[in-house]
C-alpha cells in the first residue's frame, strides 16, 4: 500500500484558497503540486461496488487552472475516481466510499452539502456524446441554466460565448435552432462541452471525451481543453498516451493488479513520460502493457 | 473534373440494376403461377367436399407451400428452409390481416346506408329508431363520448405519466406496490369499474352523469397509460439523466425538462392507447352515464349519450332500421377514432431526434 511518490510532496500553505496542505502527503501517494493553488484534492479516497473494493486510498491534488490526465489500463478505477469527484458515483445503488474530496477546502461529501448545487461547480463531459435529443443546439447550450434555474441576463450572449469556447460557434452559428442530434459525433461532443461551460463551472471532468471521435475532432477538442485550462481546472481520463502527453500538465497513473485500483504515481506530465519514478509507470507509458 | 472525364472515356456505359431483386420476367411468371394455383384451388373447392372462402384459403395455402417445397429441392438446405419458413410467415401475416379487413369491410358496407350529411349533426330526440334513415343522427352521442373521453384523459394522462415517472425516475420505496396495483387494475373487468363508480359517485350524487361515466372510464384507462408510460420512459438512455445531473439539475427538473420531452412521441402513444382502450366501452357507461336521445353539453347533470350506448341501444330494439343505424354509428365511431389517432400522431409524434 505504500506507494510513495517523493516528488513534490513538500507541505505548503496556499494563501489564495486557504488550504493547508497537511503532512499526510508525505505518507501516501500524492500528486506533485506546482506553485499553483489547489482546485480539488482527494484524501484517502476509497470506492466500493457492493463488497467489491475498486479504489484504495487515493490521495491526489489538482492545481487550479491546469489539466490533469488520469491514465491507466482498463478496469483500474480511474473512471470511478473521476465520477467520485462530482458525486455521480452515488447514483449507482451498490456504490460506497470512504475518504474526502475537498473543493475549496471543504468536503463535497459532507452531510450539509447540496449535491446538485455542488455539481454546478464541477461539470462533466461523458465518453459518449449525449446532447439532449429533444432540444435544439441553442437549447442544449442553455439547458444547464434552465435545469438549475439560474438567472442569466442575456441568453444569446451565453450561447455565443460557450460555443466559441468549445470551438463550435463558427460551424453552427447559422443553425442554432437545428436539433443537437443533427451534428456529427465530434460536433456533438463539443456541444456537450459548451453545455457544461454555460453554468460556469470551476472544474471540468472529462471521461475519455475523445474515445468515440475521429482524429480531426479529437484535435479540435484538445485545443479546446488547452484554452479552457486558462480559466478552469480540467481533469481528463484518457486511454490514449499521446493525448495525455499532449493535453495534460500533470498526470496520475492508476493501476490494479486484480485487487482495488491504486494510484501508482502522479507528477508533471513531462516527468511522467520521460523519467518516471516507478518502473510500472515507465512500462505503461512506453506501451509495454495495458 | 478533368481527370474524371479522362477516366470516363475508358469506362463502358453502365446501366443501374438491382441484381438482388428478381427480374421483371420472373416476377410476371410467378404472378401467372399464383393465378393458376388460385384457379386450381377454386376448382377443388367447387368439386370436392371443401367449401367456402375458408376452404379456398386453406387449399391455396397448401398449394403454395407444396410449390415452395418442390421448388426448393435442389437449392440446398439453408435456402430451402428459408423459402419454406418465408411462405409460412407470409401466410401468417395474411391470416392476421384478415380479421381486421373483415371488420373494416363489414362496417363500411353495412354502415354506409345510414350515413347522410345530417347524420353527424342530428340527434334522436324527435326521430324514432324505426324512422327512415335520412332522419335523426348520432351528433349527441359523438358529443357525449367526446366529453367523457376528454375528461377521462384529463384525469388519467397526468396520473398515468406521473406513475410512470415514479416507477422509472423516482424509483421510490413503493415501486413494487405501485407496479402491482397497476397490473391488477389492468385486469379489472370493465363492468366492475362501472359498478364501482355506480356505488360511489352515482349513489352519492343520486344521478347518472357524464362525469361519473368519465370516472369509470378513467379506472380502465389508467393502467394502460401508466404501463405504456413506464415502458417508454425505460427507453430513455441513462446517459441523458447523468448529463442533466452533472449540470446541477435536481431530479424533478431533470425528469420534467429532459426525460419527458425526449419521449414525447411515446407518451402520445400512451395517450392514444388509453383512449383506444375506453372509447368503445359500453359496460361501465351502462351503470354511470346511461344514455340520452338528445344533445347534452353539461357532463355533470343527468344521463348523457355516448357512441357505444347509442349502438347498444339501437341493436337491442332489433328492427331493420335500428340495426342499420347501429352499424352507421359503429362506422362513425371507428372513423372518429382513426381521425383522433392520425391527429395525435401528427401533433405529438414530431421527434427532433
Image (spheres, coloured by chain):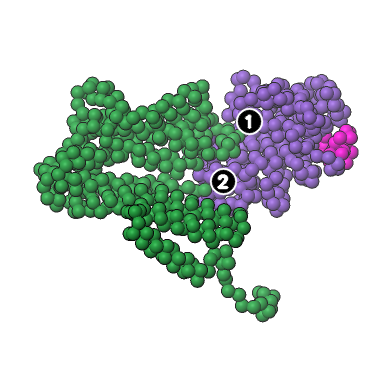
Chain colours: A purple, B green
Q: Residue at x 59, y 25 (%)?
A: A114
Camera-nearest residue between B262 and B144: B144
Mark 2 or mark 1: whose residue is earlier in sequence: 1
Query: Where residue A264 sits: x, y (%)?
Result: 82, 31
As drawn, the label of residue B270 is: none
Examine the structure image and report whether residue A172 is included in the region drawn in magenta. no
Q: Is residue B208 above or below residue B48?
A: above
Q: Which residue is mark 1?
A: A88
Q: Residues within 10 Å of mark 2 (few under 14, many from 20)?
A: many
Q: Residue at x 72, y 38 (%)?
A: A237
Q: Are marks 2 and 1 in contact (CB under 8 Å)?
A: no
Magenta stretch, main secondary structure class: helix
- In this rendering, would B71 be left or right of A20? left
Camera-nearest residue between B187 and A283: B187
- In this rendering, would B126 be left or right of B63? left
Q: Which residue is mark 2?
A: A159
Amino acid at each position: 500500500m505504500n506507494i510513495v511518490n517523493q516528488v513534490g510532496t513538500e507541505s505548503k500553505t496556499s494563501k489564495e484558497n486557504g488550504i493547508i496542505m497537511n503532512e499526510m502527503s508525505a505518507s501516501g501517494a500524492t500528486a506533485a503540486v506546482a506553485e499553483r493553488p489547489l482546485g480539488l484534492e482527494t484524501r484517502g479516497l476509497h470506492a466500493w461496488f457492493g463488497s467489491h473494493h475498486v479504489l484504495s486510498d487515493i490521495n491526489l491534488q489538482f492545481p487550479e487552472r491546469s489539466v490533469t490526465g488520469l491514465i491507466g489500463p482498463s478496469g483500474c478505477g480511474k473512471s470511478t475516481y473521476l465520477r467520485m469527484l462530482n458525486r455521480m458515483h452515488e447514483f449507482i445503488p451498490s456504490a460506497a466510499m470512504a475518504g474526502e474530496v475537498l473543493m475549496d477546502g471543504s468536503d463535497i461529501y459532507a452531510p450539509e452539502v447540496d449535491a446538485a448545487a455542488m455539481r454546478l461547480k464541477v461539470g462533466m463531459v461523458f465518453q459518449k456524446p449525449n446532447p439532449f435529443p429533444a432540444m435544439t443546439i441553442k437549447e442544449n447550450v442553455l439547458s444547464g441554466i434552465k435545469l438549475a434555474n439560474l438567472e442569466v441576463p442575456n441568453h444569446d450572449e451565453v450561447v455565443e460565448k460557450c460555443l466559441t469556447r468549445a470551438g463550435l460557434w463558427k460551424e453552427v452559428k447559422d443553425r442554432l435552432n437545428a436539433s443537437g442530434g443533427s451534428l456529427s459525433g465530434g460536433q456533438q461532443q463539443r456541444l456537450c462541452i459548451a453545455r457544461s461551460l454555460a453554468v460556469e463551472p470551476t472544474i471540468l471532468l472529462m471521461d475519455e471525451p475523445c474515445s468515440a471521435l475521429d482524429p480531426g475532432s479529437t484535435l479540435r477538442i484538445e485545443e479546446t481543453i488547452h484554452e479552457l485550462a486558462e480559466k478552469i481546472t480540467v481533469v481528463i481520463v484518457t486511454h490514449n498516451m499521446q493525448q495525455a502527453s499532449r493535453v495534460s500538465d500533470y498526470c496520475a497513473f492508476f493501476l490494479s493488479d486484480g485487487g482495488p485500483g491504486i494510484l501508482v504515481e502522479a507528477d508533471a506530465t513531462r516527468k511522467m513520460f520521460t523519467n518516471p519514478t516507478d518502473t510500472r509507470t515507465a512500462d505503461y507509458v512506453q506501451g509495454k502493457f495495458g | 473534373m478533368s481527370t474524371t472525364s479522362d477516366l470516363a472515356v475508358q469506362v463502358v456505359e453502365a446501366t443501374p440494376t438491382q441484381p438482388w431483386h428478381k427480374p421483371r420476367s420472373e416476377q410476371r411468371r410467378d404472378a401467372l403461377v399464383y393465378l393458376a394455383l388460385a384457379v386450381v384451388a377454386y376448382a377443388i373447392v367447387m368439386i370436392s367436399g371443401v367449401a367456402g372462402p375458408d376452404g379456398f384459403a386453406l387449399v391455396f395455402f397448401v398449394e403454395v407451400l407444396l410449390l415452395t417445397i418442390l421448388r426448393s429441392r435442389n437449392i440446398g438446405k439453408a435456402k430451402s428452409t428459408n423459402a419454406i419458413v418465408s411462405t409460412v410467415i407470409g401466410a401468417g401475416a395474411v391470416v392476421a390481416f384478415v380479421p381486421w379487413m373483415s371488420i373494416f369491410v363489414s362496417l363500411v358496407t353495412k354502415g354506409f346506408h345510414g350515413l347522410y350529411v345530417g347524420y353527424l349533426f342530428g340527434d334522436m330526440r324527435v326521430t324514432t329508431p324505426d324512422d327512415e334513415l335520412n332522419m335523426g343522427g348520432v351528433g349527441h352521442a359523438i358529443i357525449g363520448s367526446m366529453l367523457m373521453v376528454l375528461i377521462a384523459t384529463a384525469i388519467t394522462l397526468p396520473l398515468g405519466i406521473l406513475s410512470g415517472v415514479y416507477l422509472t425516475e423516482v424509483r421510490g420505496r413503493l415501486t413494487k406496490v405501485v407496479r402491482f396495483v397497476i397490473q391488477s387494475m389492468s385486469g379489472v373487468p370493465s363492468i366492475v369499474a362501472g359498478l364501482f363508480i355506480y356505488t360511489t359517485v352515482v349513489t352519492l350524487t343520486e344521478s347518472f352523469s357524464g362525469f361519473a361515466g368519465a370516472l369509470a372510464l378513467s379506472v380502465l384507462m389508467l393502467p394502460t397509460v401508466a404501463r405504456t408510460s413506464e415502458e417508454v420512459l425505460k427507453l430513455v438512455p441513462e446517459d441523458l439523466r447523468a448529463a442533466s445531473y452533472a449540470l446541477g439539475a435536481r431530479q424533478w427538473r431533470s425528469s420534467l425538462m429532459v426525460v419527458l420531452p425526449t419521449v414525447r412521441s411515446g407518451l402520445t402513444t400512451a395517450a392514444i392507447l388509453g383512449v383506444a382502450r375506453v372509447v368503445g366501452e359500453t359496460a361501465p357507461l351502462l351503470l354511470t352515464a346511461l344514455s340520452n336521445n338528445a344533445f347534452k353539453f353539461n357532463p355533470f347533470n343527468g344521463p348523457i349519450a355516448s357512441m357505444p350506448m347509442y349502438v347498444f341501444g339501437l341493436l337491442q330494439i332489433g328492427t331493420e332500421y335500428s340495426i342499420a343505424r347501429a352499424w352507421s354509428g359503429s362506422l362513425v365511431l371507428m372513423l372518429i377514432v382513426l381521425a383522433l389517432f392520425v391527429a395525435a400522431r401528427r401533433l405529438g409524434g414530431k421527434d427532433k431526434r
